Amino acid sequence: MAVEEKKKSRRKKNREEEKEPVSKKKERKAYEFPGQKRDPPEERDPLRIFYESLYEQLPGCEMAQFWMMENGLLPLEVAKQVYEKKQKKNHQQRLSSPIKTIKSVTVKKNTSTPSKSNSLESKTVLKQLKKRKLAAEDRSDNDDDNFVPVAKKKVKK
């Protein structure tokens, strides 16, 4: 019985040891520049070379500014300005409503006084839908587009 009790106590200890590392959480790294999300890449990193040269050629390029800000490659003052610019842009995107595509449109006929603007709008929407359908059909019927006629040899008499 003493052997069984020792095995049980060992099992309990092993189980307790296994449970402890599970509670570890990954800590977020705090960076010194505003908007920085990653460590700066090495100097010979192709992305770094691309974005640095793009930023040198076009200092107003948002794509280069944002990438360099997120990687901590901009000076502190410039990084603050770019971070504010990005925050404003993100805020504007959240406020704007998403674009919805029109799948089908139903037109209601009013028996009362018809307004010219409503009828014009519905006609233009219907025309756009017809154009889309025709364009889709043209894309699907492109078998004839790939046909190349074989050139006939000329025979001299």
Image (cartoon, rainbow, N blue to C red):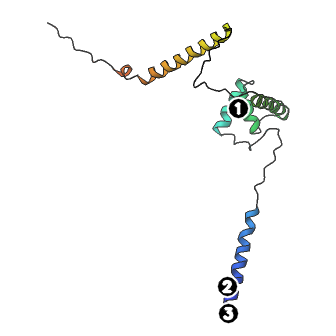
How far, Cα to Cα, is label 2 from label 3?
10 Å
From this viewpoint, which residue is outermost toward the bottom? Answer: 1
How far, Cα to Cα, is label 1 from label 3?
73 Å
Residues at marks 2 and 1 touching, judged by CB atoms closer than 8 Å = no
Task: Give the quarter of the figure containing the N terminus.
Answer: bottom right
Q: In this view, does 64 lie above or below 142?
A: below
Question: In the drawing, does residue 29 fall left or right of residue 100?
Answer: right
Element marked by disc 3: loop
Element marked by disc 2: helix
Question: In the drawing, does residue 22 fall left or right of residue 100?
Answer: right
Viewer-proximal residue among 94 and 67:
94
Q: Dot 3: few (<14), some (14–19), or many (≥20) neighbours within 10 Å?
A: few
Residues at marks 2 and 3 touching, judged by CB atoms closer than 8 Å = no
Count numbered badges in the picture.
3
Q: Mark 1 points at which residue?
A: 52
* Residue 76 point in image, percent of width and height: 84, 35
Kindly report which numbered mark, 2 or 3, lies closer to the viewer in this rendering.
Answer: 3
How far, Cα to Cα, is label 2 from label 1?
63 Å
Viewer-proximal residue among 104 and 23:
104
Say which residue appears at 70% left-offset and 76% top-offset: 14
Q: Earlier along the polypeptide chain: callout 1 or callout 3?
A: 3
* Residue 140 point in image, percent of width and height: 43, 24
Q: Name the residue under label 3.
A: 1
Identified by mark 2, the residue type is Lys
Q: Residue 7 carries which label?
A: 2
